[in-house]
Image (tube, grey):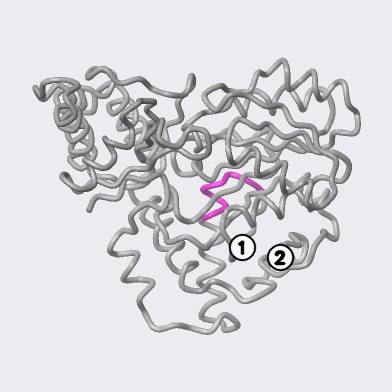
Amino acid sequence: MLLFTPGPTPVPEHVRIAMAQKTIHHRTPEFTEIFKDTRERLLNLFGTEECVILASTGTGAMESTVINLCQKKALVINAGKFGGRFAKIARAYNIPVTELCYEWDTPADVDEVIEAIKSDEDIDALFIQICESAGGLRHPVEEIAKEAKKIRDITIVADGITAVGVEPIDVSDIDALIAGSQKALMLPPGLAMVGLSAKAVEKIGNGRGYYFNLASEISKQRTGTTAYTAATTLIIGLGEILKTIEKAGLDNLYRVTAKRAEATREALRAIGLKIYPKTPANAMTAIIDENSEDIRKILKTEFGVNIAGGQDHLKGKIFRINHMGLIEHYEAAWVVNSIELALERIGRRVYDGTANAVFNKIYFG
């Protein structure tokens, strides 16, 4: 079965082998050496001055940034399930929050965000997804961050869980960049990471919370350990995958991912399907179609391909195809070919190989 869901993504064999070695204790010189090396590689990936690694899902990292980086009022961009999650976290801690809500296919409007910041001086932190994976949407995060910083020194928190390792991210005006293990980093779920600017570290101060207190984690991780029990196996895997990415070249990974995303979108357009978001992210392709569930079922049962459906009000209305991580071109070509075959199965069009031909022409063009 080919796993083409936008997380979890397949774990490469050499990474699985690295994680299958004998377990080592997290308070030993051996693990400290591994941790320090992995942390340095992660800083290179983020391009930030500081970072922390948390034994949690991406939601834990989201929660940590809310409680540690919002001191007055949060501005949340909600264009999907995960934008809405930022607002729910803030309310769980009784942090005042203003939401700017958009349809799940619609990117945040830069002028509306800036106006919201100008009109409320209590807003000291902005929370936004780079890629809102509920609909495969790309927000103009870098532009929003740049314009927001012109108003005042507002903290910008960007959820890059489905963007880090997918495309270059300009962190010049981003104070916290969140990543998760089970996306482009091709690991099992359970590890979250946050890249931090120097200003973010200063704002964190002594931190807030207990387990998700970023101040205590920064202090410990600078010495090569973690405040609490480290996810040793996953951190070993993280180090291994970061070495793989560095060897292949980060720019090359971005280029190939973008080419695969473009080829997939154009191949599916060529067979009459509609891209759902107005500004698609390269992490995944989301298709809106009344036969979404039929197509997903045929792909899984007849062609050995597992893709994701929609959530909440988009359940049964869209399907999503992953582009994150190290994916062989022939596997991606098989996915679009299978979708064209599925359309024939349900009587939508006669199969003629168009999707595969368009994919390969663009990918290798």
Helix, strand or loop at disc 1? strand
Quarter of image, res 227: bottom right
Disc 1: which residue: 54
Quarter of image, res 356: top left
Q: Amino acid at mark 1?
A: Leu
User: 103 and 146: which one is in front?
Assistant: 103
Query: Does 347 sit left or right of 211 as displayed?
Result: left
Percent position of residue 142, x then y = 62, 28
Q: Residue at x 15, y 31 (%)?
A: 345
Percent position of residue 96, x then y = 85, 40
Residues in magenta? 42-49
Q: Earlier in the sequence, mark 1 or mark 2?
A: 1
Residue at the far left in the pictured view = 352
- Give the foreground label among 1 and 2: 1
Q: Amino acid at mark 2?
A: Glu
Query: Does 268 sit left or right of 77 as displayed?
Result: left
Q: Quadrant of the C terminus?
A: top left
Disc 2: which residue: 217
Residue 203 on the magenta span = no
Residue 47 on the magenta span = yes
Up-down relation of residue 103 to residue 57 (above or below): above
User: Marks 1 and 2: CB-CB under 8 Å?
Assistant: yes
Q: Residue at x 90, y 33 (%)?
A: 122
Helix, strand or loop at disc 2? helix
